[in-house]
Amino acid sequence: MTLRLDDIHVSFGNVRAVAGVSLTLGAGDRMGIIGPNGSGKSTLINAISGIVRATGAIAVDGHRLRSGSARTAARRGVGRTYQTPQTFTKLTLIENVMLGVPTAERRGGTGSAWWRPRERRRTAEALDVLVTVGLDDLAEQPAAILTYGQQQRLALARALATRPRVLLLDEPAAGLNSAETQALGETLRAVNAGGVALLLVEHKMDFVSALCPRVAVLAGGRLVADGPPGDVLSRPDVIDAYLGVPHA
């Protein structure tokens, strides 16, 4: 099992944002997390990626992650994107992506004899990732020229450059038009086919249903449903969670 969550709780003062969530995600899985605003979706993936502290246990490939440590999560293969694309506008696209490409530990050698081959490798890896997201033709252009949809793709490229085992996506289709959303889905399927598990928070129900064979629903920080999209979205308690009215 690639990702395992056991009884995850996250609190901010007296506010319980995530309350006892347990989930598992395999290497070939694509899972969507849905729920009304304030249900704890983004907080949950912030806990997995080490942005916020949590109680309970989070493990990747059997290795337990240290709570509140983004570095530990990244080292264990957790990559992520954010609701707002995290890009450096004054850098070129390939320079943006190279920031995420792991650097090999230096083991002897001095000067350019050590540095140049490794930089060529990192550049090649960054270009491969840009090909994956369809931005290789803009590799040498500054990120400042990108449209919002292209910024989202660049943010995805930076996350992929870290070679994740688990990729967390926070509303990746937000702000995208229908063509961009469809292209994103195709890219994510290709990434998943390469063995990367996908866990995405999203409000576009049609996008989630088309991409993810499995959907989890959060309401009030609690997991209220987990299963195939068609089954989950037809459940009365899920409908109630979105409408905010208890089911009679």
Image: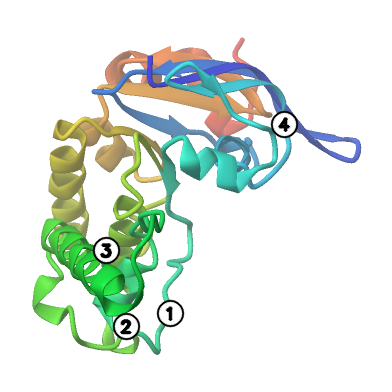
Which residue corresponds to mark 1? 88
Q: Quadrant of the N terminus?
A: top left
State yes or no: discs 1 and 3 in contact (Cβ < 8 Å).
Answer: no
Label 2 – label 3 distance at C-alpha:
11 Å
Q: Quadrant of residue 139?
A: bottom left
Label 1 and label 3: CA atoms lie apart by 13 Å
Dot 4 or dot 3, earlier in sequence? 4
Instruction: Check the image and name the residue furthest to the top.
Output: 248
Question: In the image, 238: left or right of 187?
Answer: right
Which of the colour schemes (rainbow, by chain, secondary structure, one colour) is used? rainbow
Q: Is residue 78 above or below residue 218?
A: below
Q: Earlier in the sequence, mark 2 or mark 3?
A: 2
Circle 2 is placed at which residue position?
Answer: 143
Does residue 87 sit above or below 3 in this rendering? below
Residue that mark 4 sits on: 54
Which sits in the foreground, 94 or 189? Answer: 94
Front residue of 175 and 131: 131
What crowding class fits label 4: few (fewer than 14 Cα within 10 Å), some (14-19), or many (20 or more)? many
Which mark is nearer the camera, 1 or 3?
1
Q: Quadrant of residue 203?
A: top left
Residue 193, position as x, y percentages in the image: 14, 32
What's the residue type where badge 3 is placed? Arg
Q: Amino acid at mark 4?
A: Ala
Cα separation, mark 4 vs mark 2, equals 34 Å
Mark 4, secondary structure of its residue? loop
The quadrant of the picture occupied by the C terminus is top right
Q: Amino acid at mark 2?
A: Ala
Is 87 located above or below residue 217 in the figure? below
